[in-house]
Image (spheres, grey):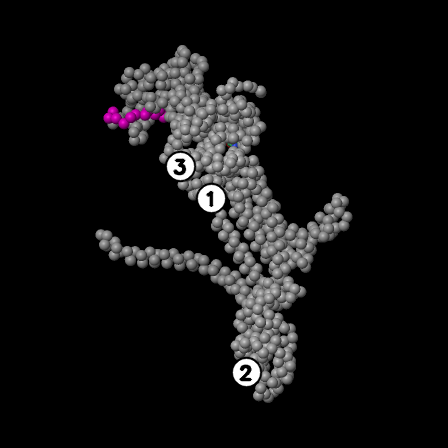
């Protein structure tokens, strides 16, 4: 498998990587992934989908069963983990409890036998960046969760690795702190020009922080794309379901032309839609529409696809209301309605007009 | 309204106190049986035993007045005639009450000939009390004019004595009352203490060397396998100490399994002396005490996430370095606990060295048993026991200090 790459090679390349722990189940099936220098790529997926496994293979704590991983031009398969020069932030931070913050930060520099004055400079700079200078002499157990998180990050950055891996680093923080740290991480990434591979199963976090998000399921990347594209143009039913909220209606492809199609639904209804991964006429399909793209009553009048639905109940969420409707055979059809006067006239059991544009509906292959 | 609240405050406090008192009483009632048991079965007997190490009441019981007078005597030349008289008048009643017998044993520790002097003097005492006993007594036996005899008696006069404790570390008081080491040919206890420390230290070290890798294995293996191994570790607990010790004799004696196997394999010609010496003692004690090292180590290691070592490796450390610099320091609390536990238990070992060791492998406990059972010198037994207890307490204090200083707490 000797291959050469042009000079502007991606920093990380997974080429046909497979991984099985027990020889039966392939936790990672045929992974191909390129990560460019300076990119912030997130691996997103449900629990057990193989995200950590991918990260561990990259860090060197697991070996691929087959396939190759490249870091720059270097093939990683036989390079032991301590020689890879990859910074890693662990889910539980893994700060050495018997060392102070400062000693933790000096650790990678001492191992690299950096002269004292240089090491000191680097540690002080990174302490400045994470704003924990006054905590340098404390032990990790004397820090708050957010502070520990920052130290863990600093330790992974202080030796200026070419790549930083983070495995759910914000998982243990409360919501407010998590959002704050997301922002700080993002800023650090920009300021230092880092290349980051980030693992999470929180989709909000993934969309919020990443240049690109790789959605994992079943050991396969379902889609790798920018947050916007993932949300607006999901490739398949899994991605559509996993990212954001989504209504689906079962149907068959009745008419197909280029990237638009017409889907016939139950009870003789039909809707126009964009094509994502359907390949043939008469294929059974899931029509997917985001709740916020659905319009109600008067607003629906001018739209191409209009349906009559029955209101089941309401959920007040402060800035908007989620209306659960029964549409065709789906009684979990949600519509997101901004707070307004028209809302007050609606009651459970009433029938309403729902409508959406062709381009807001997507026809996805049934999984 | 706030004034009313302030008025209520004392009442509130009283209520609180009453409620607390009730709670405390309940708690006390619950632990009372335990406290009583501990007092009766532990504090009281041990206290009495330790007391014997400094108790010197024999003369005060047998010859109370003489004891008091001798304590006032300055120890120079001969005591006053009053002391002679008091001794002579108290001796017959002491013999009658039987207190003289016990005092005689006490006198033996000072000078074995004094007891005979006493009984002989008693026998030869004139029926009619003479006017001046300080003349009569030396006539009965000239030794009564020897100040050394009176000094020896004076030593037994005070209520408390440090002679047993001093003797336990090979120190005695000379005629002037100054401390000095005993004659080299009488030195035994320092050697015994040293030997006890060396054997305990060796056993602890071997336990640590064997136990650390095993505990690491137990902590890192998958649960099923590690549970199975754990049963093997705990197996010794389920067998009697005596049985295990005897088993080692069977294994290690000159016609035993080990020697036969080695001879059979042609590795040695003559059987090796593996038992009834230091080797046998250390092997058996290590075997018996190993679980006490493994268990604390295991419990600490179980709590150390493997991600620490991974973190160190990802930061560039060679796996060995990561193990040594990051893993081992986190196990120190367990190492300290296991070490101190094994060491303290080893310090007091008796049966294993007694059965598996030679004469030069007997530890302090052996001599405690010897003095209690064989020579009936309970004072010496108590003094040796006290020193052992003090050594243990000091060690425990050191351990406590180390553990509390250790910042690694999860
Ligand atoms: N050391 C291992 N031995 C055997 N199976 C493993 C091992 N590590 C992970 N697995 C299995 O591999 C699959 C993927 O695990 P992985 O840890 O990569 O998931 P993940 O995507 O990181 O999930 P999560 O979001 O819960 O962390 C899981 O089914 C898991 O049971
Ligand atoms: Mg994971």
Give A268 or A170, whichever is nearer the viewer.
A170
Q: Which residue is mark 3?
A: A131
Q: Residue at x 55, y 57 (%)?
A: B392
Answer yes or no: are tags 1 and 3 on the same subunit: no
Q: Residue B317 at x, y = what percent?
A: 54, 36
Could you say whether the residue bearing mark 3 is in a helix, strand or loop? loop
Q: Residue at x 72, y 52 (%)?
A: B273
Q: Which residue is mark 1?
A: B410
Q: Chain of mark 3?
A: A
Disc 2 versus disc 1: distance between alpha carbons? 73 Å
Q: Residue B141 at x, y = what percent?
A: 64, 81
The image quadrant of residue B128 is: bottom right
In front of the other: label 1 or label 3? 3
Q: Which residue is mark 2?
A: B82
**Which numbered disc, 2 or 1, marks the residue that appears first in the sequence?**
2
B354 w.r.t. A248: above or below: below
Disc 2 versus disc 3: distance between alpha carbons? 88 Å
B83 with respect to A320 (left or right): right
B384 w.r.t. A217: above or below: below
Q: Residue at x 38, y 26 (%)?
A: A244
The image quadrant of residue A142 is: top left
Could you say whether the residue bearing mark 1 is in a helix, strand or loop? loop
């Amino acid at each position: 498998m000797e291959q050469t790459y042009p000079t502007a090679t991606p920093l990380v390349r997974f080429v046909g990587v497979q991984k099985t722990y027990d020889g039966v189940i392939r936790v990672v099936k045929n992974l191909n992934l390129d990560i460019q220098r300076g990119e912030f790529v997130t691996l997103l997926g449900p629990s057990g989908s193989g995200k950590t496994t991918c990260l561990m293979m990259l860090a060197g704590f697991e070996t691929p069963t087959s396939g190759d991983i490249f870091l720059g031009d270097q093939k990683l398969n036989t390079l032991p983990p301590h020689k890879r020069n990859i910074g890693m932030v662990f889910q539980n931070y893994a700060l050495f409890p018997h060392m102070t913050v400062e000693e933790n930060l000096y650790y990678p520099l001492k191992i690299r036998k950096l002269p004292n004055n240089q090491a000191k400079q680097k540690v002080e700079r990174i302490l400045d960046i994470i704003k924990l200078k006054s905590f340098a002499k404390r032990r990790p157990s004397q820090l708050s969760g957010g502070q520990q998180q920052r130290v863990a990050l600093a330790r992974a950055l202080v030796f200026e690795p070419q790549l930083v891996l983070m495995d759910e680093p914000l998982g243990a923080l409360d919501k407010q702190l998590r959002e704050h740290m997301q922002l700080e991480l993002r800023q650090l990434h920009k300021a230092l020009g880092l290349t980051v591979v980030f693992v999470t199963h929180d989709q909000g976090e993934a969309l919020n922080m990443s240049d690109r998000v790789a959605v994992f399921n079943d050991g396969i990347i379902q889609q790798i794309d920018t947050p916007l594209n993932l949300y607006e143009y999901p490739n398949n039913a899994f991605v559509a379901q996993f990212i954001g909220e989504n209504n689906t209606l079962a149907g068959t492809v009745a008419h197909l032309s280029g990237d638009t199609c017409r889907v016939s639904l139950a009870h003789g209804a039909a809707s126009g839609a964009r094509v994502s991964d359907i390949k043939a006429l008469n294929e059974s399909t899931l029509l997917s529409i985001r709740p916020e793209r659905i319009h109600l009553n008067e607003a629906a009048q001018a739209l191409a696809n209009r349906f009559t639905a029955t209101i089941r109940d309401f959920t007040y969420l402060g800035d908007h209301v989620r209306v659960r409707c029964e549409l065709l055979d789906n009684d979990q059809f949600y519509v997101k309605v901004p707070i307004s006067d028209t809302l007050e006239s609606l009651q459970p059991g009433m029938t309403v007009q729902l409508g959406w544009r062709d381009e807001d509906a997507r026809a996805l292959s049934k999984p | 309204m706030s004034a009313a609240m302030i008025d209520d405050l004392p009442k509130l406090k009283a209520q609180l106190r009453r409620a607390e008192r009730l709670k405390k009483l309940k708690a006390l009632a619950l632990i009372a049986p335990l406290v009583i048991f501990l007092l009766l079965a532990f504090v009281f007997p041990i206290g009495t035993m330790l007391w014997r190490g400094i108790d010197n009441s024999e003369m005060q019981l047998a010859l109370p007045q003489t004891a008091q007078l001798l304590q006032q005597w300055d120890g120079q030349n001969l005591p006053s005639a009053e002391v002679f008289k008091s001794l002579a008048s108290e001796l017959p009643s002491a013999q009658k009450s039987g207190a003289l017998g016990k005092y005689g044993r006490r006198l033996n520790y000072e000078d074995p000939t004094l007891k005979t002097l006493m009984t002989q003097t008693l026998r030869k005492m004139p029926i009619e009390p003479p006017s001046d006993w300080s003349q009569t007594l030396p006539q009965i036996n000239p030794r009564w004019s020897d100040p050394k005899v009176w000094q020896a008696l004076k030593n037994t006069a005070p209520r408390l004595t440090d002679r047993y404790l001093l003797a336990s570390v090979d120190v005695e008081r000379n005629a002037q009352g100054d401390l000095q080491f005993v004659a080299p040919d009488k030195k035994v206890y320092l050697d015994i203490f040293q030997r006890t420390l060396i054997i305990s230290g060796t056993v602890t070290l071997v336990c640590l060397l064997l136990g650390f890798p095993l505990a690491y294995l137990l902590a890192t293996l998958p649960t099923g396998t590690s549970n199975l191994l754990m049963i093997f570790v705990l197996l010794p607990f389920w067998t009697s100490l005596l049985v295990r010790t005897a088993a080692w004799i069977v294994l290690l004696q000159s016609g035993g399994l080990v020697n036969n196997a080695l001879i059979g394999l042609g590795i040695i010609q003559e059987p090796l002396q593996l038992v009834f010496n230091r080797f046998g003692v250390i092997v058996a004690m290590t075997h018996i005490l190993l679980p006490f090292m493994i268990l604390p180590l295991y419990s600490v290691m179980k709590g150390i996430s493997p991600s620490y070592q991974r973190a160190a490796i990802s930061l560039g450390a060679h796996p060995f370095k990561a193990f040594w610099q990051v893993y081992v320091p986190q196990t120190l609390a367990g190492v300290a606990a296991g070490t101190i536990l094994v060491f303290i238990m080893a310090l007091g070992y008796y049966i294993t060295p007694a059965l598996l060791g030679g004469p030069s492998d007997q530890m302090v406990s052996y001599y405690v048993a010897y003095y209690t059972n064989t020579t009936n010198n309970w004072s010496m037994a108590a003094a040796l026991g006290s020193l052992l207890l003090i050594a243990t307490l000091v060690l425990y204090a050191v351990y406590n200090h180390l553990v509390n200083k250790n910042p690694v707490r999860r």
